[in-house]
Image (cartoon, rainbow, N blue to C red):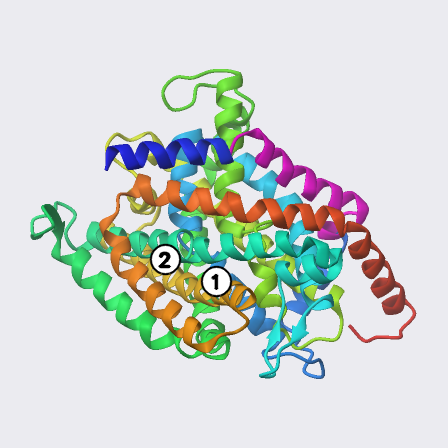
């Protein structure tokens, strides 16, 4: 297992070396400039459109349902565990770079949502299909179909072996174990390794629930997400706001800590100084930021393509709000709680245990109550992420196989099997595997976004011109 972990770490380090980090930031910066800082000037309108459904448009679900489906896949362990691992590995400065990546990522997400609707198609069964594979093939031309297929392959693998299954179920079982059996007093040996009964039981329950829902496709997933996701985001945000308001005097020091760490002005974990700190903070911040909000990854436009809308730019604005909610709001609050509590510096804590410690420190409740709130939020967030990524990866598979129903059914059971084994992998292995496939997905999508940035700009100018002239209502 050590050899396997070392191989995965090496591959992950190679993928997430400077070229990909720079590519993600450059893509977001380019789109930000070409679109005239759309994430600033149109954020208010985007938040308003987020809850205004355009029922007259063609599609399978409402714009809000499409957003909730996307949020169900993004608001997950990345917001709770991902922020903790980023700050633990890269210091508080990782949160700063996560925010910078998210700011530019909003423009990236806007472009993804716009292109998804503009180049979507309807298959022989009447299903609306869209995403990077279609805007690569139909936007760049058939000669780029190989790049579209490459994205689809990486998307299937990311869903099956990375962000969609093992990271999420691992986060759920870890949180449950920290709550019900933190000292691992009740264990069972599986293939020579001891696991707690909590891990086994919770893992099986989640696996069964996933199996019952994923067979329903996008409409069932969207129906669940529309109810569950907003409710749990509100509960989580209220908890974070309680932490912030009850420790408001500690916020200035935490912000100073974050900024100084981001620019190497104070030691990070392990005592590193200067450029080494900046490099690690930048890498971990961008990497975990992409894992959390998926801007540039190419996943959200797969859900956006199913929205009932006639205006690509309108759906781009709605899609953009996902990054704002996910990272600018949720991840920021999580990161502030962790930095204020100093949980990232405590020996023996990793993953969800860091955030649990921060919640126990910050919430004015008994530690068991705080741990239960975090466990409940993480469980629901991660569960809906599993559902959302099943839809994403199936759409990638459909593109590769021509919507073969037998292959799709087989893949769903394979997906359920991956959820089943996720609890028994180590935290480090889980996150490194996810990092590998996240990075591989991003490459083809970023190439397409940069190449199609002119199309995005023209479509945006036309939309806002017609809006100003009163030719369209939204």
Instruction: Report whether 201 appears left or right of 166.
Output: left
- Image point 62% across, 53% down: which residue? 146
Q: Disc 2 versus disc 1: distance between alpha carbons?
A: 11 Å
Category of crowding for the residue at label 1, using alpha-carbon neighbours closer than 10 angstroms: few (below 14), some (14–19), many (at least 20): many
Mark 2 or mark 1, earlier in chain:
2
Q: Nearer the viewer, residue 154 or 49?
A: 154
Query: The C terminus is located in which quarter?
Result: bottom right
Which image quadrant is residue 209 in?
A: bottom left
Q: Main secondary structure of the magenta part?
A: helix
- Classify mark 1: helix, strand or loop: helix
Category of crowding for the residue at label 2, using alpha-carbon neighbours closer than 10 angstroms: few (below 14), some (14–19), many (at least 20): many
For residue 27: magenta?
yes
Q: Is residue 171 above or below residue 5?
A: below
Q: Residue furthest right?
A: 469
Residue tagged 2: 165
Q: From which residue to which does the magenta span run?
A: 16-40
Query: The N terminus is located in which quarter?
Result: top left
- Classify mark 2: helix, strand or loop: loop
Q: Position of residue 48 (x, y in %)?
A: 68, 67
Instruction: Report whether 134 appears left or right of 431.
Output: right
Q: Which dot marks residue 459?
A: none
Q: Which dot marks residue 393?
A: 1
- Asked if one can make out residue 366 in the rendered structure from this viewpoint, the answer is no
């Amino acid at each position: 297992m050590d050899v396997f972990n070392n191989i995965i770490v090496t591959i992950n380090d190679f993928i997430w070396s400077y070229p990909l980090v720079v590519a993600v930031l450059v893509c977001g910066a380019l789109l930000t400039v070409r679109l005239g800082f759309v994430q600033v000037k149109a954020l208010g309108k985007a938040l308003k459109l987020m809850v205004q459904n355009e029922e007259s448009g063609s599609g399978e679900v409402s714009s809000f349902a499409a957003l909730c489906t996307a949020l169900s896949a993004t608001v997950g362990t990345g917001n709770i565990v991902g922020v903790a691992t980023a700050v633990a590995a890269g210091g508080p400065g990782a949160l700063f770079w996560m925010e910078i990546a998210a700011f530019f990522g909003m423009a990236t997400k806007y472009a993804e949502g716009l292109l998804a609707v503009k180049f979507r198609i309807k298959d022989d069964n009447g299903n609306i299909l869209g995403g990077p594979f279609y805007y690569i093939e139909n936007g760049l031309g058939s000669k780029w179909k190989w790049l579209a297929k490459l994205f689809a392959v990486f998307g299937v693998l990311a869903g099956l072996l990375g962000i969609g299954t093992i990271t999420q179920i691992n986060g759920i079982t870890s949180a449950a174990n920290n709550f019900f059996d933190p000292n691992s007093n009740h264990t069972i040996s599986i293939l020579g390794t001891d696991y707690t009964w909590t891990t086994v039981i919770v893992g099986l329950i989640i696996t069964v629930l996933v199996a019952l829902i994923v067979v329903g496709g996008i409409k069932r997933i969207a129906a669940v997400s529309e109810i569950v996701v907003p409710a749990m985001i509100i509960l989580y945000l209220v908890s974070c706001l309680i932490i912030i308001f009850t420790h408001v005097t500690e916020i200035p020091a935490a912000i100073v800590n974050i900024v100084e760490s981001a620019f190497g002005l104070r030691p990070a974990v392990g005592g590193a100084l200067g450029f080494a700190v900046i490099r690690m903070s930048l890498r971990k911040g961008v990497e975990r930021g992409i894992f959390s909000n998926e801007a540039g990854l190419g996943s959200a436009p797969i859900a956006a393509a199913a929205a009932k809308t006639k205006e690509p730019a309108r759906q781009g604005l709605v899609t953009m709000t996902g990054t704002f909610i996910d990272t600018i709001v949720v991840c920021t609050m999580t990161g502030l709680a962790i930095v204020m509590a100093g949980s990232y510096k405590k020996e023996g804590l990793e993953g969800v245990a860091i955030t649990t410690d921060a919640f126990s420190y910050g919430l004015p409740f008994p530690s068991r109550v705080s741990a239960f709130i975090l466990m409940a939020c993480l469980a629901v967030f991660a569960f809906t992420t599993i559902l959302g990524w099943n839809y994403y990866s199936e759409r990638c598979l459909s593109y590769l196989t021509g919507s073969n129903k037998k292959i799709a059914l087989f893949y769903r059971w394979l997906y359920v099997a991956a959820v089943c084994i996720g609890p028994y992998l180590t935290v480090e292995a889980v996150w490194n595997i996810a990092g590998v496939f996240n990075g591989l997905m991003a490459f083809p999508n970023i190439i397409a976004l940069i190449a199609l940035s002119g199309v995005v700009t023209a479509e945006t100018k036309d939309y806002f011109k017609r809006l100003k002239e009163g030719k369209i209502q939204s």
